[in-house]
Amino acid sequence: MTRKTRRLWIVIACLACVGSAAALTLRAFSSNIVFFMAPSQVKANPPSPDRTIRLGGMVMAGSLHRINENGTPVNAFEVTDGQAAVEVHYTGILPDLFREGQSVVALGTVQKNGGFTASEVLAKHDETYMPKEVADELKRTGKWDPRFGKAPDASSWDTMTAKKAGG
Amino acid sequence: MMHLPNHWPYIAASYGLTLGCSLVLGVGAALRLRKSKARLAAVEGHARRRERSAS
Amino acid sequence: MRPTPNLLHRYANPGQFLRLAHALLPWLSSGAILFLIVGVIWGLFIAPADWQQGDTVRIMYVHVPMAWLASSCYLGLAVCGVLSLVWRHPLADLAAIEIGPVGACAAALCLITGSLWGEPMWGTWWVWDARLTSMLVLFFLYLGHIALIRAFDEPARGQRAAAILALAGVIDLPIIKFSVQWWNTLHQPDSITLTGAPTMSMMMLWPLLICTIGFTLGVAAVIFTRLSAAIHESRARQLLARSRLDRRDSQVA
């Protein structure tokens, strides 16, 4: 029994070592693990124009428009995290999920004037899964506008839509 | 609500791959169990006969 | 065989395990088929489309169970590793050999279905964000385990090395789980958590739950079947080796 106990303790000690090593490594690299930077971080300390970064945030409602830059149509929109907004220019087809109020991640560089030129735009959807009918009903009754933020709590959908159907 | 293009190929591929792999794993395991049972029975029978002839 | 009064050792007895597997297998496999038929039909045709993802959200009903199974199979490998290193269970090593490929399949399917979901929704097949990368690491851990446990002529050495790898790799499981909370990733956070209410319609939660139960029962059935087969195979091998020894002895005599 003592040999078994000793082996058990050796295993536990090794696990603790590996665990703390991994935790320390992850802490040290945590800024590199971050997939994207928020607009306020970009505004606070702008990276140099030759560095490619990912910018993540919400497309500001009413900010999407098309402009002409040297004869080519460019999608221009603002990405915000609630504290700061960055103007993004992107030439190319936007993903299907792209809309105002949607979270996006743009890959590109920060220009000298503070704008952001993207070479790639990815749509980031949130963890809320809602039937289309519920979303339409919430939008129709004015209880939620997807352009201005997250959907209401899932547990409230039934009562929010049922009240309307009943009344 | 914007128009979403049809993504059924992606859905069909996901379900096809997942269910196909599950089927292959399940049937493969069942066949292997049957084969191993038959082989063990054969080997055991053989050993028993040898013992009987030896004694 | 020595009598083994310890509870832990009762199911390490291969004969005991064979009886248990024989009794459980019909229930596991029929349950898996039933749940999967209901779950897949529900998920594909009855569950509502998502308001922003449309029908593509249906990939969730196979993607999430695969992710869950890849993690739980690895946890199983780690438990087998402890049992093998500390208590030297013979059954734990056999189980580790049989669980590895099943878990690797689940991890591969999780990555592939995730990719098939990411391309139409995010606009990319693959990104190096924390969730996706840690899942890929899990897949490589499985491949390493499968290779290592078969790498040595003397099985015991490979089994011990693989057990150590399985234990060290367990650190990847919390990283996968919490990656979407600790760092900002392209992958969305979990919709179902232990503490909070699910951020998902019940009409989607039910098929997801049923598919997950179905796949879990199916994988349990596959592992039990493979392990039973492995026990039969090793018994046949032992008998053959013994009879070969007997023959050599009688020839010498």
Image (cartoon, rainbow, N blue to C red):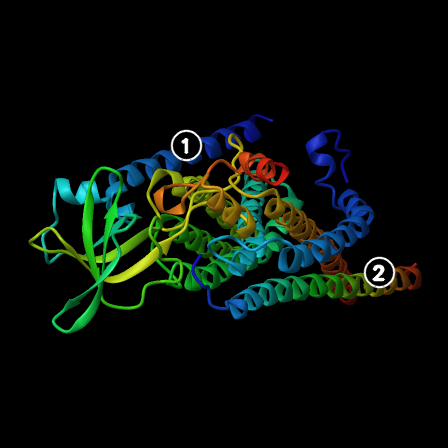
Residue A29: % across, % down: 26, 43
**Which residue lies under the disc numbered 1?**
A16
Q: How many marks do you count on the picture?
A: 2
Of marks 2 and 1, the one in the foreground: 1
Give the quarter of the image for residue A155: top right
**Disc 2 crowd, CA 10 A, few/some/many (<14, 14-19, 20+):** some
Q: Say which amino acid is labelled 1.
A: Ala
Residue A68: % across, % down: 16, 68
Q: Give the chain of mark 2.
A: B
Estimate the spatial distance between the alpha carbons at disc 2 and disc 1, rounded to whole Å: 47 Å
**Which residue lies under the disc numbered 2?**
B44
Q: Determine the secondary structure under disc 2.
A: helix
> Quick check: marks 2 and 1 in contact, CB under 8 Å?
no
Q: Residue furthest front?
A: A167
Q: Determine the secondary structure under disc 1.
A: helix
Along the line of sight, the residue nearer the viewer: C186 or A2: C186
| Res. C150 visible in picture | no
Q: Quadrant of the N terminus of chain A?
A: top right
Give the quarter of the image for residue C41: bottom right
Give the residue displayed 45% in from the left and 63% down from the top. Answer: B3
Q: Residue furthest bottom?
A: A71
Along the line of sight, the residue nearer the viewer: C106 or C151: C106
Give the residue displayed 25% in from the left and 39% down from the top. Answer: A28
**Disc 1 crowd, CA 10 A, few/some/many (<14, 14-19, 20+):** some
User: Relative to residue A50, is residue A150 drawn left or right?
Assistant: right
Q: Quadrant of the C terminus of chain A?
A: top right
Residue C201: % across, % down: 57, 43
Residue C234: % across, % down: 71, 57
| Res. C60 visible in picture | yes
User: Relative to residue A62, is residue C179 drawn left or right?
Assistant: right
Q: Say which amino acid is labelled 2.
A: Glu
- Image height check: is C205 above or below B10? above
